[in-house]
Every structure is written in C-alpha cells, then in structure tokens.
Image (spheres, rainbow, N blue to C red):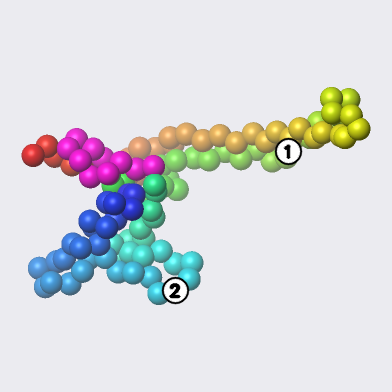
Amino acid sequence: MNRNTLATVRKFKDADNNYLWQPSYVAGQPSTLLGYPVVEVPDMPNVAANAIPVLFGDFMRTYLIVDRIGTRVLRDPFTNKPYVQFYTTKRVGGGLLNPEPMKGLRVATS
C-alpha cells in the first residue's frame, strides 16, 4: 500500500477501540497490521473505486527474482580519448511464480 492508503489504514480500530495498526519501535523491523508486517510501496494506487490499493500475502512464494551471478565489464579506450570508458551490464529478471499466496483488496464502487 502507498503512503495515502497507509494513512487511512492507520486509523482503523477493532470492536474494543484498539488500533489495528501497531508501529514498530525497533530499527529495521516493520510496523504491523493485525500482527502481519506492512511494507510501503509508493507505486501502489490510492484508495478509489475499482482500485486495488492493498496486496496481502507471501511475496517470497508469489514472485521470483532471478539475479544472474557476475557482471560483464567492457573496456573502451578509443571512444573518449584521453580517457577510458567502462560499460557494465548485469542481468536481473523476475516474474510471477505462484499467484495463490497473494490476494488484492479491491475497493468497491460507491
């Protein structure tokens, strides 16, 4: 969820008037919502009709990141004399592995 959605969710309370959001007081530990860690993602949409502003689930089982070992370096002494230029490339990819562990919260139209 993004920052605006997070601001809305932080105000949610249960039947006993306790906040569902629990901030983290330990560096490096995420805040929690109903005991589950929350990660802020700026690219998620705001709360709006037919939007999916919240994803809930296990990202480790849903999405696979492939990081090829090694970096290629190409030395170019000719293009920018008297300097030497270096071109580097690294191959990284990713994709959907299994959609079942992840669910999106769709906001209904009003």
Are discs 1 and 2 less than 8 Å apart at CB? no
The C terminus - image quarter = top left
Total numbered labels: 2
Q: Is residue 49 magenta?
A: yes
Marks 1/2: CA–CA distance: 36 Å
Instruction: Residue under label 2, please give it.
Output: 26
What numbered label is drawn on residue 71? 1
Magenta range = 43-52
| Mark 1, secondary structure of its residue | loop
Instruction: Give percent across and percent down for residue 89.
Output: 70, 33
Q: Is residue 10 magenta?
A: no
Q: Which residue is pictured at 22% across the width and 65% down the height?
A: 20
| Mark 2, secondary structure of its residue | loop
Q: Amino acid at mark 2?
A: Val
Is the residue 14 above or below the residue 99 in the image? Answer: below
Dot placed on the residue nearer the N-terminal end, 1 or 2: 2
